[in-house]
Image: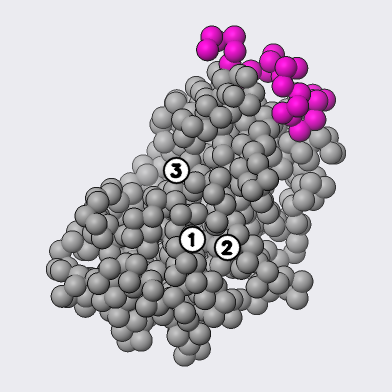
Amino acid sequence: MTSESMLCRKALPLIEDHLLAPEWRDPRIGIVHLGIGNFHRAHEAVYTEEAMLAAGGDWAICGVTLQGDVTKRDALMAQDGLYSVVERGLQGVKTTVIRALREVLALPHDRARLFDLLADTNVRIVSLTVTEKGYCRDTKTGDVDLGHPGIAHDLEHPGEPGTVPGILVAALKTRRDAGIAPFTVLSCDNLSHNGAALRQVVCSHARALDEALATWIDREVAFPSTMVDRIVPATTDADRDAAAAALELRDEAPVPCEPFRQWVIEDRFPAGRPAWERVGAQLVDDVMPFELAKLRMLNGTHSTLAYLSMLAGFATIDEAISFAPLRTLIHSMMTHEIAPTLNVPASFDLMAYRDALLERYANPALKHRCAQIAMDGSQKIPPRLLATIAARLGRGQAITGLALGVAAWFVFLRGHADDGTTFVINDPLASRLTALATNAGDVENAPESLVDAMLGCRDVFSPELASNVVFRRALIEAVTQLGSGTRTAIENTEKLG
């Protein structure tokens, strides 16, 4: 295709059928989003465009990449910030071009422009999807991890930050010193109590620099919690080709996703916000019941599916859930092990939620790769599985399925599937974890060695949980089962309760 056939703003009149509405003005940037990945572009950005169409407001988005790679910035800016969201469901495919993204920056290259925006009075929200590892958080204390190389750099060079805590503290200090009201900091990551967790990280980082600044942030800055939900796989060349066929314009940055979406938001925005409640978001006083339900029911079973599938040879979630014993196992886990740990409003039907999740997992059009979900297990396992396990152990309840999910992660860290296929471990602690897993001996003959080695990792397991004899025994049994073959282990464990 020629450059004239690329997706861009001057081509919008040609694709009105693929817009949320034909009318559009050019709103000013009101949101800076850190971590401009696929999830944000299929979730918050869509809600925000819909909210501006419904109720107006200057809430255009500037997205920021934090890893030094300019590829995404350049691809999106070549398209004037436009991209398509490709919803794939049982009813077919719907392709929609989103216009809310006005600018994309890449650190460290665009630091000056980023901090100009963060000091702009019209920027009233800084949101983020940086995954658990992006918080640079000491999981044992909840404070910022002072041993993190990026944090050490930012504390030494506070005017040139590269981490999320460093960026937020520097920007908030600038606004305080200039007498500008602070922006609201909105976490959209799958982290328990994400607003409170981010507040603690940011305040502890500020405290290492300036106690008065930390006190001001704690008193003046809102950190509402959220629960976000939409399955958004990584973009493939096939997605780019499909978007081009639908639009008859080349889109280098389409985002595939499922039709389902959900957003529950704690309604604390002193500086204002888009009218998200007008377009389906739930604004509530307390996000926690929704957050825990999603974190444990969806994310917990997603991780379990991913690690079992990587070992058993299933490439995608829909392929995995079509294996009847695995579907039965996940259904049983949600019903008998996870749901009983949740305390949700009477209007929240957990069994209906379970059934909807299983239906979403089975979506054959999505092709959500298990390898994508399996990334960063050291960050994901504690909130997704270990918190549920701790709750059940505290009540003297069985953890058979949950333990199988954790054990599958242990075996996965050895880097090969049952059939010998190898894969790369993508995790912030990859070198340490893979060394622990591979040096523990033969899984079939020494499951205790693997379990004890992994339980010794204090970045993942608390001393209390690691020393729990019931937990250790369940893990040894699960690793033993996996040593005889993952599919056999699934079949032997499928019916719980």
The coloring applied to the image is: one colour
- Residue on which disc 1 sits: 321
Answer yes or no: is residue 257 visible: yes
Q: Residues within 10 Å of mark 1 (few under 14, many from 20)?
A: many
Q: Quadrant of residue 414?
A: bottom left
Depth order, front residue of 294/421 = 421
In 3D space, how far apart are the residues under numbered discs 3 and 2 (Cα atoms)? 36 Å
- Which residue corresponds to mark 3? 163
Is residue 5 in the magenta section? yes
Q: Tell me where residue 82 appears, x and y as whole percent.
A: 63, 26
Identified at 68% across, 32% down, the residue is: 96
Q: Which residue is mark 2?
A: 358
Q: Is residue 221 visible?
A: no
- Determine the secondary structure under disc 3: loop
Task: Report x, y in % for residue 99.
Answer: 69, 28
Q: Which span of residues is magenta-colored?
A: 1-25
Indicate which disc, 2 or 1, sits on the residue closer to the N terminus: 1
In the rendered image, residue 83 lying in the magenta stretch gets the answer no
Q: Position of residue 234 (x, y in %)?
A: 48, 41
Task: Find out whether the residues at labels 2 and 1 contact each other: C-beta distance under 8 Å.
Answer: yes
Is residue 61 left or right of 168 when viewed as pictured?
A: right
Name the image quarter holding residue 326: bottom left
- In the image, taking residue 281 as reference, residue 55 lies left or right, namely right
Say left or right for 378 vs 11: left
Q: Is residue 85 above or below residue 433?
A: above
Identify which amino acid the numbered label 2 is placed on.
Leu
Residue placed at 74% from the left, 52% from the top? 281
Disc on the earlier residue, 1 or 3: 3
- Up the image or down, 83 lies above or below 390; here it is above
Query: What element does badge 2 sit on?
Result: helix
